[in-house]
Image: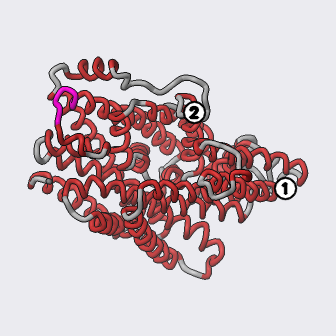
Amino acid sequence: MLRPLDIAAIVAYLAAMIGIGIYFSRRNNTTEEYFVGNRSFSGWVIGLSMLGTIVSSATFLALPAAAYVLDWRQLAVNLVLPFIAVLAVLIFIPFFRRGKLTSAFEYLGMRYGTLPRIYGTLSFIFLQLIRMSQILFLVSIPVQFLTGLPIEVVVVVAGIFIAFYTIAGGIEAVVWTDVVQALVLMAGCLLCFTYIVIDLPGGVTQIVEAGAAENKFSLGSFEWNLNERTFWTVVILGIINWLAIYSGDQNMVQRYLAARSTREARKATIIYSAIALPMWTMFFFIGTALFVYYQAFPDSAIAGLETDQVLPYFILTRIPAGLAGLIIAAVMAAAMSSLDSGINSISTVTVVDLLRPYLGKEYSDRFYLRVARTVAALVSVLVVSGGILFSRIEKESMNDISLIVTSLFGGCLMGLFMMGFFTRRVNGTAATIAMLLAIMFNAYLGFGLLKWLPNAWTFSVHSYWIGALVNLVFAVTAYLMSFVIGTSTRDLTGLTVWTLQKSRGRTEDAAQLTSSVSTQD
């Protein structure tokens, strides 16, 4: 159970989050402030906010658990992060920064038209709702373990708390709480590692030697077998995953847009990428260290715990009161930073992509600000409801639900952005036809995997490859359709890698003209 000093540390952390939300609530008078903070953030702030958003509570608990029970093979998915970050810095960020965009899906509208934009928006919303519900449920498991409260109570209280400062403070509250949460996260990670090392007689050397003897540092088999979780399979999946996040995830794109300049957005991405990979590696090292620790100091209670409860158990039993509370706050911070970002990003795309284009200027900006806060409240209710639902079903059923939703809505979103960025041929009609075919193919593969179709109607494909195959089908179909339908008639200036330089040239010419006029005046 939690000790008084632990409770004090957690309460102090939660009070700080509420204080940040209240402070920034007074400064949100326009949608521009609420969605992108007047585009005024510096690179280091955005970089830490990215870190807080991407590293969830599932990461904090699941990665050490994976290393504790098996090895480091799941780290391979993140080894490609620096390479994709280079693409983001050189290519993706200039695309989204070229105009005063607020949503990633505005780009799809400019590049292809209405249907791909709506598809991208709805796909993001549904996937985020499922992801956030899972995160809220997963963080509630260790909190329930530590407090003894019913899990439904934990889910509701946590959901209401996060919703309050997110709805009140908008993106500024989200970004600054993410910064605090990222710092708490890093401190908690280092504290866990330090106390394990201090207790072990041989320190880091003992962890490395004992872990190596048990093959705990393995990155998986290096055989070329795409139906197994080999090193190469996980790396390819990592490329697909990080391409999708850096090129079209609203949580990431919204931070590109909230930076005060393209340079600061690039700096943020570099800072995030430079910190994230060492942090993930540290999570795995903590898992291996825990394995070695409980070999050196056997504890009968460990046998009765779930794998992801081993780290919370160590925190409560081996780390001094107060510091343990700080680490528990770090676990909570990892969840909160992912959830607040998701709530704000869904309210953003709902207003920017689904309402404002059709309601237009008939309504004031203050009206859209009220709508954004209302949407954020509704999203919070849905996430809390989803968290409670996940708490009442079997984990296998939870995985099935995730698979179904991903199959229906995860689809070809990455392909839409990639074909938009890197081709001039594919127009809106070709993209829309290919998108519809890819969605049907995605549903077909997903239902086949769930055994919802007769065996004679399906072909065997591992679940790892559904996303890759669907995006491949989209890309090939869209490109071939472009030869039948014809190339795009839209003005693609600034919308592809082949026309971005023209956009820069026009911007420079306009700046020179403005300067000349000002001089003449």
Is disc 2 placed on a helix, strand or loop? helix
Rendering coords of residue 376 (x, y %): 44, 70
Judging by the rendered image, the residue that carries numbered circle 1 is 489
* Residue 513 in view here: no
**Residue, disc 2:** 233
Is tag 2's residue or tag 1's residue first in the polypeptide sequence? 2
Residue 472 position by quadrant: top right
Say whether residue 455 is left or right of residue 184. right
- The amino acid beneath tag 1 is Thr
Disc 2 residue type?
Answer: Thr
Give how far across and how far down residue 57 sits, in percent.
35, 49
Specify the quadrant that holds the C terminus.
bottom right
Q: Residue 109, position in %: x, y?
A: 69, 60
Residue 430 in picture, x, y percent from top left? 81, 55
Q: Marks 2 and 1: which is nearer the front?
A: 2
Of 198 and 224, which appears nearest the observer? 224
Q: Is residue 450 at all visible to an observer of this figure?
A: yes
| Residue 164 within the magenta-colored segment of the rendering | no
The residue under the point 26% across, 33% down is 290
The residue that appears at 51% across and 65% down in the rendered structure is 348
Residue range of the region highlighted in magenta in the rendering:
293-299
Tell me how far mark 2 sits from mark 1, CA to CA.
Answer: 39 Å
Residue 82 in the figure: left or right of residue 389: right
